[in-house]
Image (tube, rainbow, N blue to C red):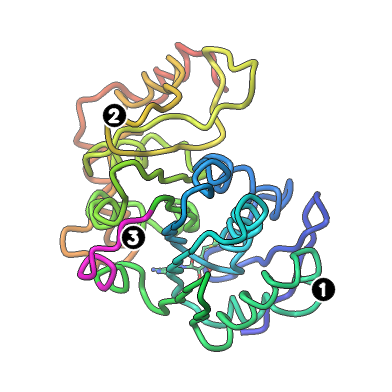
Amino acid sequence: MIWVPQSTDDGSYTFFSEEFGESFHSRQGAKAEAFQKFSEVTRLREKAQRPRLKLLDVCYGLGYNTAAALETVWQVNPDCQVEIYGLEIDPTVPLGAIAPDLMASWTAPVQQVLQTLAEHHKYLQPTLQAHLLIGDARQTIQALITQEFQADAIFFDPFSPRRCPQLWTIEFFAQVAQCLAPDGMLSTYSRSASVRSALLAAGLQIGSIPLGETHLPHEWSQGTIAAWPPTPLEPLSPMEQEHLNTRAAIPYRDPLLSDSAAAILQRHQEEQTASKLESTSSWRRRWNIR
Ligand SMILES: C[S@@+](CC[C@H](N)C(=O)[O-])C[C@H]1O[C@@H](n2cnc3c(N)ncnc32)[C@H](O)[C@@H]1O
């Protein structure tokens, strides 16, 4: 596949997937999103003071979340021993991302990691052990569960639930949760009620990625953070909390972790139609959302 870089508002580049009908990153800034929604939210700066860190990058793509994490950790503690696993189905994406223009804004050591991972799918040095597992994440994650990999931070970044429902199901989150350390944090840009209820059904607690100081009761957050109790998290706003009691919160299911996107969407649609939960439109009217 030939990937054509598209610039985003912070000057960094992203790709557009014809297959999924979506951009790989927010148009407001691909690189900024990697730092803000993933490294900052999972508190990597603070965690980098530890001698060792384990990270899981679900949907590695161009590798921006891994790159931002390494920049963050190495700035705080260059001696931190980092182990990273990236899960990615399409090896042409990381390869497309190592063109000089796309890598120019990362530091030289991070460029080296991105290039080696894209070309060889592993980077093994004393302070960094990184692996890129190519294949459907529903299968490749099994190797991490078998070796009892426990991530301090999980960057969860698939295409949106309507486009890639197979990675937002209760069953897949249950697999991912097995790779989350007791005090680890999972971050995702999604604020969808179905995603949040799937995370809850997988046994995790959830919180919001707040907009900033002025978070009003009726405002949407920037995404979702999940962790095992009792890790303290920013609570959802009352509006978002109530959203979890509506039909929009019916989660996606994939009982054998092998269904097609179409089959998962159809099962979800049937469950929504049969549901007695409050309709999402009446919740919208209550909160004055257009
Ligand atoms: C939104 S993009 C990820 C962007 C990435 N985190 C970055 O910083 O560039 C979603 C990625 O998920 C990959 N993907 C789609 N389906 C997948 C699957 N079943 N298993 C693993 N990766 C998948 C796509 O190839 C794409 O690279």
Crowding near the residue tagged with mark 1, few <14, some 14–19, many ≥20 C-alpha atoms within 10 Å? few
Q: Which mark is on residue 101?
A: 1
User: Mark 3 highlights which residue?
Assistant: 166
Secondary structure found at label 2: loop
Q: Which mark is on residue 12?
A: none
Quadrant of the rendering where the N terminus is positioned: bottom right
Asked if the beta carbon under badge 3 is closer than 8 A to the nearest atom of ligand 1, the reply is yes
Q: Earlier in the sequence, mark 3 or mark 2?
A: 3
- Distance, label 1 to label 3, CA atoms, is 33 Å
Residue found 38% across the figure and 34% down from its top? 193
* Residue 58 placement (x, y as % from top left): 44, 61
Residue furthest bottom in the image? 120
Q: Is residue 222 above or below residue 66?
A: above
Secondary structure found at label 3: helix
Q: Earlier in the sequence, mark 1 or mark 3?
A: 1
Q: Is residue 146 magenta?
A: yes
* Residue 47 placement (x, y as % from top left): 49, 45
- Distance, label 2 to label 1, CA atoms, is 43 Å
Q: Is residue 122 above or below residue 275?
A: below
User: Mark 2 highlights which residue?
Assistant: 230
Q: Which residues are magenta?
A: 143-151
Amino acid bearing label 3: Gln
Secondary structure found at label 1: helix
Quarter of the view holding residue 224: top left
Q: Earlier in the sequence, mark 2 or mark 1?
A: 1
Q: Is residue 70 magenta?
A: no
Left or right of 55, for residue 252: left
Crowding near the residue tagged with mark 3, few <14, some 14–19, many ≥20 C-alpha atoms within 10 Å? many
Crowding near the residue tagged with mark 2, few <14, some 14–19, many ≥20 C-alpha atoms within 10 Å? few
Do the numbered discs 1 and 3 sit on residues whose CB atoms are within 8 Å?
Answer: no
* Residue 199 placement (x, y as % from top left): 30, 41
Quarter of the view holding residue 233: top left
